[in-house]
Image: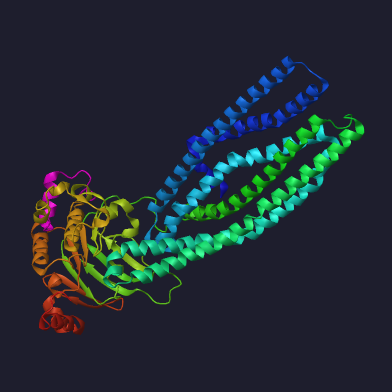
Amino acid sequence: MIKRLLRSVGEYKKLSIATPLFMVGEVFIECLIPFIIANLINDIERGCDLSQIVKRGLLMFLFAIISLLCGAGAAYTGSKASAGFAKNLRRDVFRKVQTFSFENIDKFSSASLVTRLTTDMSNVQMAYMMIIRVAVRSPLMMIFAIIMAFRLGGPLASSFVILVPFLVFGLILIARNAMPAFRSVFKKYDKLNQSIEENVMAMRTVKGFVREEYEKKKFGTASGEIRKDFTKAERIVALNRPLMQICLYFNMVFVMYVGGKLIVNSMGVDVNVGQLSAMLTYGVQILMSLMMLSMIYVMLTISMESMKRIDEVLREEPSMLNPENPVMEVTDGSIDFEDVSFKYSLSAENYSLADVDFHIKSGQTVGIIGGTGSGKTTLIQLISRLYDTTVGTVKVGGIDVRKYDLVTLRDSVSVVLQKNVLFSGTIRENLRWGDKEATDEEIEQACRLAQAHDFIQSFPDGYDTFIEQGGTNVSGGQKQRLCIARALLKKPKILILDDSTSAVDTKTDALIRKGFAEYIPETTKIIIAQRIASVQNADVIIVLDGGKVANIGTHDELMETSDIYREVYEEQTKGGNDDE
């Protein structure tokens, strides 16, 4: 896992190596300064002249400047290396997600992926910073300080034999008790993000049903669970400070009492004032280093959970891959379903589609009718290979879709969903998602076919009108027509409209279908609709029921042979509600 993550260090390797080198220099000098001070105190006690004091003072000042420069250098290179590492890792994870099929996305959930790319990534960045800086500084400081303490302090250094194991044991005990609470937080972050995501995306629904208070309570519960776990963990970690203070004051009392007694009894022969001063400084350095190591242990343990979650994404293999020698061209828009059955999970008991078998000629207009849950959307997702069949074969242009290059296949199939997404940017920029090289004339023609040109021209800025994120500043019908125009710009072999005219009136719907028939006769058009009027003139109409093909035929044929189709038609025409 660590090797996989460290691949993202990339061009920041030199900075990552420079940071601990700066740390070595800073720690060495910081441990050397108390030694110089101790000698200076002893020299003053012996009655040295002012010039020697000035020389020692200038030397300490020089060392302090060098230590400062080393610390500043480590801060600069460390922050740049950790931020660069996080940038590369975020990029690698995002690129990996782009290769995922819907099956992979379903495994993680979108809310969890957002958490991994934000909160988890910040934890890993902080951990990397600590590893190349603090995790180098603290153990080095402790080792150098202990060496200097035993060299200078003699019997005074014996306090560390007691304090260090006691403090280490206490800090490890604190960290281990805090870890379960920290670990449980991450899954709760997923729930919190999911609550936010659902609320923002469904804001109109929330307000329409006056469910703001319910959403507030749901969010408050998720946020409260995180607060509860963090409070528990932080309460345990907070014991670090009193434990540290106890050891620090014990060391000060021990050194001052025992050291003062030794100085008096030996008349400064066994221990002198300079050594006493240095021991107090080294004692603080050793104990502070241990405390920092405990914080590093806590932070790295927290970050280890984040690393595992990020590594899960990097290790995940896309469920759909190109074959070794993929077919790079879709010759026509013919579609064949040969004994196809499909379920979203291999462990699922029931199939979403079962024994589906039909054949569509290139250029035909095909209508698909069926109730909610009949498998309409599932069926069209198999055509562009968003999912692979569990049983059977789907062919496009006479070739199994699994033999195509994925980009080639999906470029040849345009899907317009009922709830398509528009991105922040101008209308022109959104439309060029279909073809980034599309000319203004091609854009206008696609919009005329989609019956979008007139309302676009009614805007003051026309095609340069800015669309807010999610298309919130246009109506549902306008959004659907823009999405249809965007799909047309791909010049697809197959155009799939998944209930994508549900928000437009019947007249506009008829004009869109008329434009398709006249201007893109060679494109296979699949129209999924709730309105019989939307598919009534199709060459073939497929009636789905419970994931199976109930009937296939023209409107007239189905009126005679299909009870389901006839019942829907009569309800919509006799009921006088064409929008059902």
Instruction: Using residue 244 as the reference point, say whether residue 494 is left or right of it.
Output: left
- Of residues 140 and 235, the one nearer the viewer is 235
x 73%, y 27%: residue: 37
Residue 216 visible in the displayed image:
yes
Question: Percent position (x, y) of residue 532?
Answer: 15, 75
Which image quarter: residue 47?
A: top right
Position of the C terminus by quadrant: bottom left
x 49%, y 49%: residue: 122
Q: Name above or below for residue 454 compared with residue 58.
A: below
Q: Name above or below for residue 524 compared with residue 566.
A: above
x 62%, y 28%: residue: 67
- Of residues 214 and 347, the one nearer the viewer is 214
Magenta stretch containing residue 448, yes or no? yes
Q: How many marks?
A: 0
- Of residues 108 and 16, the one nearer the viewer is 16
Instruction: Using residue 229 as the reference point, say whether residue 171 is left or right of it.
Output: right
Magenta stretch containing residue 490, yes or no? no
Instruction: Using residue 549 as the reference point, say whether residue 153 is left or right of it.
Output: right
Q: Residue furthest right?
A: 265
Which image quarter: residue 88?
A: top left
Query: Which contiguous range is marked in magenta?
Result: 431-452
Question: Percent position (x, y) of residue 434?
Answer: 22, 51
Q: Name above or below for residue 498 compared with residue 54.
A: below
Instruction: Using residue 37 as the reference point, say whether residue 112 is left or right of it.
Output: left
Question: Percent position (x, y) of residue 540?
Answer: 16, 71
Question: Percent position (x, y) of residue 34?
Answer: 72, 30
State how the image is colored: rainbow
- Of residues 571 and 138, the one nearer the viewer is 138
Residue 333 visible in the displayed image:
no
